[in-house]
Image (cartoon, rainbow, N blue to C red):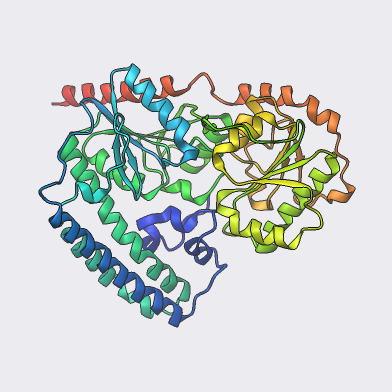
Amino acid sequence: MKTLDYHEIIKWDTTNFVTLHDNVASRVYYGKLQPTMLQDLGIFTRSILAGIARIGHAIIKSIAGNKKRSKLKLVELPYLLLITIGSAKYASEENEIVTTCKLKGYDVLSVYPSHGIKGSSSPHILPYRSFLKARDYLHVMIQWGWHVILGLKNLITMDSKQRSLYVLSITSIQKFFIDLAAIKQIISIQGKPVASLSLCPTASTSIIFNDHLRRQGIVTGGLRTQTTSEELEHQAINADIMYCKSLHELGIFNNIFGSDGPDLRKGCILSLPKVYPLEPLHLPDEYILLLGTAPGAEQSAGSYAQYNTRIFSIGANSGLPIVFKGHNLARDYDNQWFSQHTDIINPCIRISDICRNRELVERATVIVSAASTLLYYAILCEKPIIIIDTYLKLFNSSEFSASPIFFVHWNDLIENLHIDWKGIVGSSRQANQWFRENYFLDHGAHHVIKDLLSSYSADKLHCKSSK
């Protein structure tokens, strides 16, 4: 596995820089964007001013709301600390874990990175400023300022990439110390959790929280509910236990960590689309569902547009009405592509609401997609699937590459491609069987929570016997 370049600069939020998802930081890290000295100085100035304004505003709000600050305990002891994104995409697995913990007599405190915290019985998320004090923010200001000053040498380096990464890390440094203050206050107000579990183990909040919790002797666990490939960002994982949902994922983490990283165990909680109380869409009785993809950090605009062109070519080949469900991170890219390809996309029903994912999959006749998380549900529903490669670097690590699902490779010419539609329909049951043989579906939420809490009990016993 490749080692991380510029580690000392990007360590405050490694994932933001090395992720394969497209953002400014990752584009700079992978050399797709090369800001000038003048642009970097502009980013530096704006980041400093914005950082001072954020902390100043937080201090004022904290002082003004000092009498109203809630010290109400959001959870009852014992409780599990759950770190989760909290978007609609992650809602089903969060609910599954909360329900499982309640059955075992444990409360759950959910932490949403950059947003706040919520007790399992509370409908509202409390922002950090509702429990962080003015002195906490003042301490953050001092630590942030000191580390920014220590890094000023990066502004005058001859390495332009080092300079650009430094100015982009300024906001990450501040966020690091806010998260650190948050976990200290959570423990101070809510008490120590029996254990923590992160559904986003590479997120900076997870890494910061885990580091502090481990120093407190609290067992930390992590798991991925979405598709996994061998990416640089996984090197940042610092949980005690990493639950692996499949043989493929177990192999990836073994390759990354060897014997030096987390304790790798079986545990499978999948990100499946949630049920929403919505009126059914007016859709054709039969249709081919084309799923958009997220733009990658190393992916050119041309290769992204080519992905859409290819899936629509396959859709046209099927002879079925086309329904397109775009990725929420690619809305602008898709808008541009649709405006340039009005000749080949009609008739097409375009859906953007993430709450419709379950309905779209269940009602589809055939599904065409990149190797994405939504395919978990499609395979479980025994839907005929065509996986189309996005670009070569991601395909090499696709967790579906050993499955009987029909693949269209990046360099396959669509116009010369023979698609056996009857064979694709017939392979859906084989894909379901392969999935059940290669994923640890019998090691679900009940197994993960039981194993994590037993690890806490064993660790507690060990501590007592060591005294």
Apparent side of residue 254 relative to residue 322 in the rendered image (left or right): left
Q: Is residue 303 visible?
A: no
Identified at 75% across, 51% down, the residue is 410
From what the image shows, is residue 121 above or below residue 64? above
- The picture places residue 319, in percent across and down from the top left corner, at 85, 39
Q: Answer left or right for 239 relative to 281.
A: left
Q: Nearer the viewer, residue 177 or 309?
A: 309
Residue 461 in the image: above or below residue 373:
above
Q: Residue 337 in the image: state x and y as whole percent.
A: 70, 59
Residue 345 locus on image (x, y percent): 77, 52
The x and y percentages for residue 365 are: 75, 31
Which residue: 62% across, 43% down? 397
Q: Is residue 28 left or right of residue 303?
A: left
Q: Residue at x 81, y 38 (%)?
A: 320
336 in relation to 418, above or below: below
Please tell me how many numbered marks the rendered image carries.
0
